[in-house]
């Protein structure tokens, strides 16, 4: 059931756009060539007029399982991801319990194996007291080591200087950092409370989670990485100011890389007036000029990866007051369509979008045989229709939270089909979860 001949495809891969057929056999790409002849027991899928790209590898999601399943779980969120052309995800450790022990890591892997429609891997969480565990971590068991250098959620803030130094010295796999300076944020929040009491407007969020807090923490992470020669990946860059800290150019050869997220390409602080807490996230969405600079940094290579930071919360939770409403947005179902809006506007090329969403994460984390349309690689593929607009409706949201910050927005493209390991998991608006995803493997 995983043998396909995808014909007449308009392929975007490895910096090229070209016409070809793709033969998929036993879950892998067997051949890429024009005018391939159909073979017995092979289903034919006519991709004419549509764009075939490697499925997105989203290296930053929060699928909420275990412990927060009222917001999302591996079943619901992986299906939303596949509907959005995301074929693989790497999940963050701030669940309940946190993924900060080998036992918690194994539990997540077992849960995903039973539920996830997409391929999966998990980042291991750092704390102030698990340095010895990190030193013993099998480099093939986790995609990366996540350090919350700003207190975004739970009790995972790592603020002990000796522990930070030890983690950067010991890490044998990429370190991923959430960079915001907590003391600066707390001081900003205290000032806003003095001014507004319990009625802080959400419009103050980018000034509480300020650009200065981002810059200070990002500088610290980069200094530690340079001191120890550590492979560092700084997540969800939200300010123009941080960009000068990263080298332009291709990913190859870099020890320090940066990532941004699709909501920073789409929204600006002007949208708080209509979206309110629905776009409250950490780090905060900031100015339109930051957005412009981030898009430019994707083009120059100062930003290497485009991800989601998918983080669902219920509408009830989001409708609380500013301080009580949690931070995070559900994004995986519409991530590629959101990125493609930058192509329609002439800001990003198709080849660049594929590089930032598929090739770069595969290279950065040494993902085995995924992230490219290559013979012998797994057939993780997304088919995009650039001539089929989609207006986002709440009734079509697959994430368990049941809402999207894009509701009412009309994307100028749609995701026509998604193959995961050769399995046609999404086609013409319908999911097929008769075959589940696989654990990602790493060449380390």
Image (tube, rainbow, N blue to C red):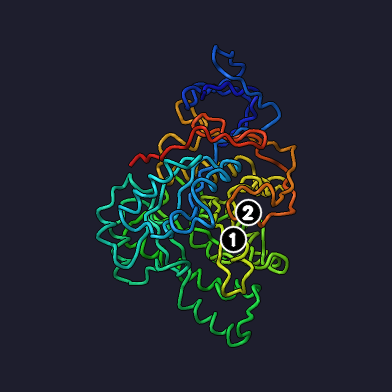
Q: Residue at x 50, y 40 (%)?
A: 118
How many labels, in total? Answer: 2
Q: Is residue 76 above or below residue 23?
A: below
Neighbours of disc 1 within 10 Å: few (<14), some (14-19), many (20+)? some
Neighbours of disc 2 within 10 Å: few (<14), some (14-19), many (20+)? some
Alpha carbons under labels 1 and 2: distance apart: 8 Å
**Residue 340: x %, y % from top left:** 66, 45
Which is more toward the observer, 418 or 262? 418
Q: Residue beneath label 2, please?
A: 402
Q: Residue beneath label 1, please?
A: 314
User: Mark 1 or 2 closer to N-term?
Assistant: 1
91 vs 45, left or right, is left
149 vs 128, left or right, is right
Which is more toward the observer, 213 or 226? 213
**Residue 371: x %, y % from top left:** 49, 38
181 vs 286, left or right, is left
Q: Residue at x 42, y 67 (%)?
A: 149
Q: Is residue 88 above or below residue 318?
A: above
Asked if the residue at tag 2 contacts the one at tag 1, i.e. Cβ–Cβ closer than 8 Å, the answer is yes
Quadrant in the rendering for residue 368 = top left
Q: Is residue 51 above or below residue 186?
A: above
């Amino acid at each position: 059931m995983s043998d396909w001949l995808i014909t007449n495809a308009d392929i975007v891969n490895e910096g090229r756009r070209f016409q070809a057929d793709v033969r998929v056999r036993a879950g892998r790409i067997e051949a890429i060539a024009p005018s391939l002849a159909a073979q017995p027991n092979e289903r034919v899928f006519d991709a004419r007029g549509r764009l075939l790209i490697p499925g997105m590898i989203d290296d930053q999601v929060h699928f909420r399982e275990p412990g927060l399943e009222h917001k999302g779980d591996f079943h619901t969120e992986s299906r939303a991801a596949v509907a959005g052309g995301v074929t693989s995800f790497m999940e963050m450790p701030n669940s309940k319990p946190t993924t900060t022990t080998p036992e918690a890591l194994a539990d997540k892997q077992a849960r995903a194996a039973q539920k996830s429609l997409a391929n999966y891997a998990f980042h291991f969480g750092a704390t102030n007291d698990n340095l010895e565990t990190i030193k013993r971590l099998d480099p093939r068991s986790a995609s990366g080591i996540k350090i919350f250098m700003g207190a975004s959620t739970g009790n995972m803030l790592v603020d002990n200087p000796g522990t930070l130094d030890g983690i950067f010295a010991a890490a044998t796999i990429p370190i991923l950092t959430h960079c915001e300076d907590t003391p600066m944020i707390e001081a900003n929040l205290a000032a806003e409370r003095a001014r507004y009491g319990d009625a802080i407007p959400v419009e103050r969020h980018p000034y509480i989670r300020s650009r200065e807090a981002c810059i200070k923490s990002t500088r610290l992470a980069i200094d530690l990485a340079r001191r120890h020669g550590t492979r560092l990946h700084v997540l969800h860059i939200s300010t123009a100011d941080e960009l000068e800290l990263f080298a332009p150019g291709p990913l190859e050869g870099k020890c320090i890389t940066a990532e941004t997220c699709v909501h920073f390409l789409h929204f600006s602080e002007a949208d708080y007036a209509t979206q309110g807490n629905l776009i409250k996230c950490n780090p905060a969405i900031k100015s339109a000029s930051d957005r412009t600079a981030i898009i430019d940094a994707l083009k120059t290579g100062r930003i290497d990866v485009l991800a989601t930071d998918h983080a669902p919360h219920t509408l009830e939770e989001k409708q609380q007051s500013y301080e009580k409403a949690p931070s995070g947005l559900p994004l995986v179902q519409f991530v590629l369509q959101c990125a493609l809006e930058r192509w329609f506007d002439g800001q990003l090329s198709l080849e660049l979008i594929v590089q930032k969403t598929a090739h770069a994460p595969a290279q950065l984390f040494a993902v085995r045989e995924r992230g490219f349309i290559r013979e012998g690689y797994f057939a993780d593929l997304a088919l995009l229709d650039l001539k089929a607009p989609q207006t986002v409706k709440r009734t079509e949201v697959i994430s368990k939270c049941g809402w999207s910050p894009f509701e009412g927005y009309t994307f100028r493209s749609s995701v026509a089909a998604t193959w995961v390991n050769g399995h046609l998991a999404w086609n013409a608006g319908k999911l097929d979860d008769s075959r589940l995803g696989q654990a990602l493997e790493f060449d380390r």
